[in-house]
Every structure is written in C-alpha cells, then in structure tokens.
Image (cartoon, rainbow, N blue to C red):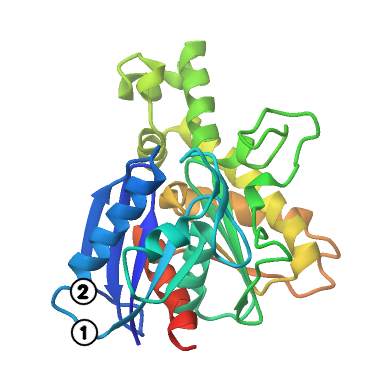
C-alpha cells in the first residue's frame, strides 16, 4: 500500500510518497510558517497535491507533528515550538484533500518507522529515544504503538531525573531533556568555552571564541577528532540517557532501545556511555535478561516513513 508521510518540523515540512516496504519514491518540502496553523495546513495541502499529481496509487496520508496529539488523532493539544494550543490540525488539512488522514506525534511516527523499517526491526518491544533539540520518544509494545489513555505516552524527555533541577521548556524542573538533549549539550559546551579553561581550546577555535556560535555539530566533530573535553560532554549526555533507559526498563521491559536524533551521529562516543550507565543502573542486573541497544538508521526520513506507515492503518479501514 502506497501512502504519503508528512513530517512538520520547526523550519521545514518534509513529505514523501512511501511504498509498503518503507522506500521513499518521491519527495517534496516547504518552509514551515510556524506561527500560522492555517498556512501550515495549506502548505501540507499543496504538498499532497504535488505528490499526487502524477500518481493514482496513494491511498492515505499520515502527518507527524512535534507536540501532544490527542488520542483521536484530531488535534494538537500543545506544541511548544509551533505555539499551538488545542489546534484542530486534522480538520484544517482535511479541507484540502479527500484522502484519509492520520495525525500523530513526530517521535511516535519516528519510532514506528524505525520499528518497521529501521534500527528496531529485529524486535517486537522497542523504546526509541530521539535526542535532538529536545528529547523525544516512542514506545512499541508487542508490535503496537503505545499511546496511553489520552494519546500522550512516550514523552521520555520529561521524565524527572533531578528534583528541583534545571528548568525545562515544559514548565517543570529537572527533566531529562534539560540534561541530555542537543540543547543541553551545546549549553554545557558554551559554558566550557566561557570558562576559558585550557580544556576548551579546541571548542573555542571551532566557534572563533564566540560561545554563542558553537553548535552541536561542532561538539560532535571535536569529539570525533579526539578532543577530550568534547568527548566528556558527550559521555555526560550518554550517562543521563543510560540511566533514564534503566528506569524505563524497570517499567516497560523492552527488548531493544533505539537511539536516534542528531546527537546519535556521535556513534560509540555516545552509545558506549549509554550502555555503560544502563548496565550499572539496571534493576536486578545479573538476574534478568537485559535489553539491547541500536542506533536509528532512517535518519531525517524516520518521521516521513513512520507517518506514512501509520497512515496505512486508516487506509486499510
């Protein structure tokens, strides 16, 4: 079954025609008019029209959006990066296409895509943790996406790991996202540059002495080159993620954790500390089977592929 997947990001909307085996055979994109829900819906309508102009085999559309999506898949309850509150996005898009629609959270879509066609395809019980600007997640339980009673399950980034700790964009303090996201990595690296310690020399050169210009890609590049400070910063992120995974394992008992997002580009420099912290903190260690770890393989396509796969559920009805 051929479907369209749409992934709404903070700066761009990516879309693609996806075959049943997870291949993207046609692509299109638009800039994201982030503050205007009507304009976003119009852009998605344009993308669908562009992708179906010469195709008659598309049977449904899946849309992935950063934010809390209600269980019915109708509205975006809260989307901090898009400034949406109780936004009836599905209805807005439905006015612009006759195809069946499915709306879901972007991390859920990415997790489902990786489960079917990527790094999680060898397991039936999978937890995906996405580490980018924030920390997202998706949970596959016995082959089904776990949404919870209100559609908001899988918000792994908002696990409380330090009571009263750093402020988080969700309004609480001490969330995992405040310590283990790409944003947290860059903040800590910038603080190190500001300290003017000798250990920060390589990072200082990369940003030409201007801490605000340092990026996560810079930190990863320095770490891959062997810079001890950058490797230490990545290891700290890995430690937080591994400890959080151990807590999740105590509740969900997954077979596999899949780590994705831009920070995962660091490979073993991140995954090694993740697995070490997990092994150290896992409850009943030595007396229970232990989950495995894998890195995501679909990259930036995970949301499109996963949204298209979720669309098949409505297309089959």
Residue at figure coordinates x 29%, y 61% from the top left: 45
112 relative position to 299: left or right = right
Label 1: few (<14), some (14–19) or many (≥20) C-alpha neighbours in 10 Å:
few
Q: CA distance from mark 2 to mark 1?
A: 7 Å
Residue 217 in the image: state x and y as whole percent: 36, 38
Q: Give the residue at mark 1.
A: 56
Residue at figure coordinates x 54%, y 26% from the top left: 188
Residue 41 in the image: state x and y as whole percent: 35, 54
30 relative position to 129: left or right = left
Q: Quadrant of residue 113?
A: bottom left
Residue 34 marker: none
The answer to whether residue 77 is visible is: yes
Residue at figure coordinates x 45%, y 54% from the top left: 267
Residue at figure coordinates x 75%, y 42% from the top left: 160
291 relative position to 180: left or right = right
Q: Give the residue at mark 2.
A: 52
Above or below, 24 relative to 188 = below
Q: Are marks 2 and 1 in contact (CB under 8 Å)?
A: yes
Q: In terms of depth relative to the viewer, which is nearer, 171 or 75?
A: 75
Residue 311 in the image: state x and y as whole percent: 44, 76
Above or below, 146 relative to 179 = below
Quarter of the image where the N terminus is located: bottom left
Q: Quadrant of residue 16?
A: bottom left
């Amino acid at each position: 079954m051929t479907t369209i997947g749409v992934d709404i990001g903070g700066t761009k909307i990516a879309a693609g025609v996806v075959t049943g085996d997870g291949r993207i055979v046609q692509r299109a994109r638009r800039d994201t008019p982030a503050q205007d829900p009507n304009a976003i819906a119009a852009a998605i309508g344009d993308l669908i029209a562009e992708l179906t102009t010469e195709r008659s085999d598309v049977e449904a559309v899946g849309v992935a959006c950063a934010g809390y999506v209600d269980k019915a898949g109708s509205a975006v309850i809260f989307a901090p990066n898009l400034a949406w509150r109780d936004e009836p996005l599905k209805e807005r898009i439905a006015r612009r296409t006759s195809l069946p629609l499915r709306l879901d959270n972007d991390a859920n879509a990415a997790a489902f895509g990786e489960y079917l066609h990527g790094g999680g395809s060898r397991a039936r019980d999978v937890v995906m943790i996405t580490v980018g600007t924030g920390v997202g997640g998706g949970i596959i339980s016995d082959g089904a996406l776990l949404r919870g009673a209100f559609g908001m399950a899988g918000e792994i980034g908002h696990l409380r790991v330090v009571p009263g700790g750093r402020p988080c964009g969700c309004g609480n303090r001490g969330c995992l996202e405040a310590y283990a996201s790409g944003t947290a990595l860059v903040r800590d690296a910038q603080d190190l540059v500001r300290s003017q310690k000798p250990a920060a020399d390589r990072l200082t050169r990369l940003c030409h002495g201007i801490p605000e210009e340092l990026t996560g890609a810079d930190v990863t590049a320095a770490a891959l080159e062997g810079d001890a400070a950058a490797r230490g910063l990545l290891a700290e992120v890995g430690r937080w993620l591994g400890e959080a995974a151990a807590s999740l394992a105590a509740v969900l008992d997954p077979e596999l954790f899949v780590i994705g997002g831009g920070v995962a580009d660091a490979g073993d420099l991140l995954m090694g500390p993740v697995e070490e912290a997990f092994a150290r903190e896992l409850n009943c260690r030595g007396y229970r089977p232990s989950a495995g770890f894998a890195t995501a393989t679909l990259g930036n396509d995970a949301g499109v592929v996963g949204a298209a796969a979720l669309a098949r559920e409505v297309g089959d009805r």
